[in-house]
Image (spheres, rainbow, N blue to C red):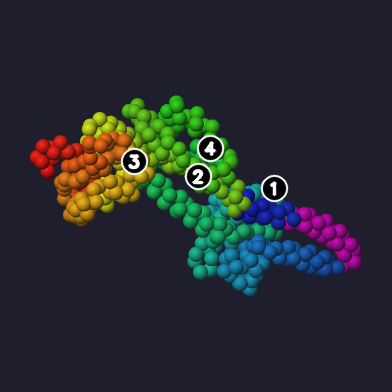
């Protein structure tokens, strides 16, 4: 129950207690008047009833005032004095009238309440405002109960709504800011209840989908989810948020207004109360179709490169910008007999002839530091099983490496080949 309802219930409980007490006082007043009248003590009966009524003014947290329907105020408790800013003495002197401290736009509500008092003896609780003594307005929830239908003897109960109204204004401002933010972001934003039923979409959803915001069908969003993805989405166990303390993430295809399906990454975060009970889900859906297409193209390009690299007779390898080799083609493993683990982390350099190794590494380091293309002849050891007594374990190769640069002219990748030139070197007699 929110604060407004709690306050209203509190006031109504006080009113019901007052009505019971007034009924008791009427009976007591009638009995006392009859008895004391016989003894000639009418004044004592009136004094007793007035004292009892005045005791009703001492309700904690509720402003109570003794008034009539003509606008006069006779007395009030401390809470009511606090609400309007006047002292008890000022009220009891008659200088303060409730009609004079009521803004003009609430006069029609007072008129309706007066009519209810005359016809029914009490007025239904309603919201209005009073002018405080310093001039600012005070919102109140007000109810009036009369001792009879003349309206000359009434008690008005007032609950100060200032804190509640300020909280509501802050909430409205926060909501307005939230909706403005939701309208600016490019993602689809949605909110669902704890069962996964959508209760809100931002403008981006309607712009993307072409669906009508005014449509009465609360499940129309299902129309734009790809059939192959809808079942997965509907069978998500939305009630068990404890299974997903960090939220839910899935890739889903949404149909655009032009009929094209585009991939989105949907993320949902459970919103819980202080008792960790699920209240709702807050989610976003971000278009990742271009990225997925680019990723697919890159994967296809990588497959094509590896296929081509394995088809040629040269050794082919690639390296990161810092020179760390991350790929060897099939020819490397055929020639050297090494495994992937043995080849990486500098293991490949051990196969270069000891007399050529330092020269090779110096030239490779220079190329890395300068980003320049390099070319070098060196001897590379091959697998023992590929040699015979008449063949050399080390065979001459021509190494070439070139750096692939990005838009900032920085090296993104090194591509290199080692081509065997043993026969050419032998013919030249080297």
Q: Position of residue 57 (x, y in %)?
A: 70, 64
Look at 70% across and 51% down and name the residue there.
121
Q: Which is more toward the observer, 265 or 283?
A: 265
Q: Position of residue 16 (x, y in %)?
A: 73, 53
- Crowding near the residue tagged with mark 1, few <14, some 14–19, many ≥20 C-alpha atoms within 10 Å: some
Report the Cα–Cα distance between label 4 and label 2: 13 Å
| Precedes in sequence: disc 4 or disc 1 | 1
- Crowding near the residue tagged with mark 2, few <14, some 14–19, many ≥20 C-alpha atoms within 10 Å: some
Bounds of the magenta span? 18-40
Look at 51% across and 58% down and name the residue there.
166
Q: Which is more toward the observer, 70 or 330?
A: 330
The quarter of the picture where the C terminus appears is: top left
Identify the residue position indicated by label 2 in the image: 247
Report the Cα–Cα distance between label 3 and label 2: 45 Å
Name the dominant secondary structure of the magenta segment. helix
**Mark whose residue sits in front, 3 or 2:** 3
**Mark whose residue sits in front, 4 or 1:** 4
Residue lying at the far bottom of the rendered structure:
89
Identify the residue position indicated by label 3 in the image: 338
Q: Is residue 349 magenta?
A: no
Element marked by disc 4: loop
């Amino acid at each position: 129950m929110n604060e407004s309802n709690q306050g209203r219930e509190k006031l109504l409980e006080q009113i019901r207690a007052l009505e019971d007490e007034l009924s008791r006082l009427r009976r007591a007043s009638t009995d006392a008047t009859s008895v004391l009248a016989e003894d000639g003590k009418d004044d004592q009966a009136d004094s007793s009833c007035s004292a009892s009524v005045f005791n009703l003014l001492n309700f904690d947290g509720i402003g109570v005032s003794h008034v009539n329907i003509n606008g006069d105020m006779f007395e009030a408790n401390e809470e009511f004095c606090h609400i309007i800013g006047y002292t008890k003495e000022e009220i009891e002197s008659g200088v303060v009238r409730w009609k004079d401290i009521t803004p003009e736009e609430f006069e029609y509500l007072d008129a309706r309440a007066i009519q209810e008092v005359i016809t029914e003896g009490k007025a239904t609780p309603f919201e209005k405002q009073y002018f405080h003594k310093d001039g600012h307005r005070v919102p109140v929830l007000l109810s009036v109960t009369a001792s009879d239908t003349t309206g000359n003897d009434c008690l008005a109960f007032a609950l100060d709504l200032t804190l509640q109204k300020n909280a509501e204004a802050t909430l409205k401002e926060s909501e307005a800011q939230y909706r403005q933010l939701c309208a600016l972001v490019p993602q689809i934003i949605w909110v669902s209840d704890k069962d996964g039923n959508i209760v809100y979409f931002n403008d981006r959803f309607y712009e993307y989908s072409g669906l009508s915001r005014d449509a009465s069908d609360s499940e129309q969003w299902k129309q734009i989810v790809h059939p192959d993805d809808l079942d997965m989405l509907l069978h998500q166990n939305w009630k068990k948020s404890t299974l997903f303390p960090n939220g839910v993430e899935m890739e889903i295809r949404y149909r655009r207004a032009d009929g094209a399906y585009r991939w989105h990454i949907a993320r949902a975060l459970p919103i819980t109360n202080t008792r960790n009970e699920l209240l709702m889900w807050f989610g976003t859906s971000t278009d990742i179709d271009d990225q997925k297409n680019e990723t697919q193209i890159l994967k296809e390009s990588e497959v094509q490169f590896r296929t081509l690299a394995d088809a040629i007779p040269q050794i082919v390898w690639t390296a990161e910008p810092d020179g760390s080799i991350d790929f060897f083609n099939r020819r490397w493993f055929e020639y050297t007999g090494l495994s992937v683990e043995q080849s990486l982390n500098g293991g490949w350099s051990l196969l270069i002839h000891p007399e050529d190794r330092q020269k090779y590494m110096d030239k490779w380091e220079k190329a890395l530091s300068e980003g320049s293309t390099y070319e070098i002849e060196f001897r590379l050891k091959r697998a023992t099983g590929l040699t015979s007594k008449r063949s050399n374990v080390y065979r001459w190769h021509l190494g070439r490496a070139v750096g692939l640069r990005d838009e900032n002219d920085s090296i993104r990748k090194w591509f290199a080949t080692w081509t065997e030139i043993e026969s050419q070197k032998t013919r030249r007699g080297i």
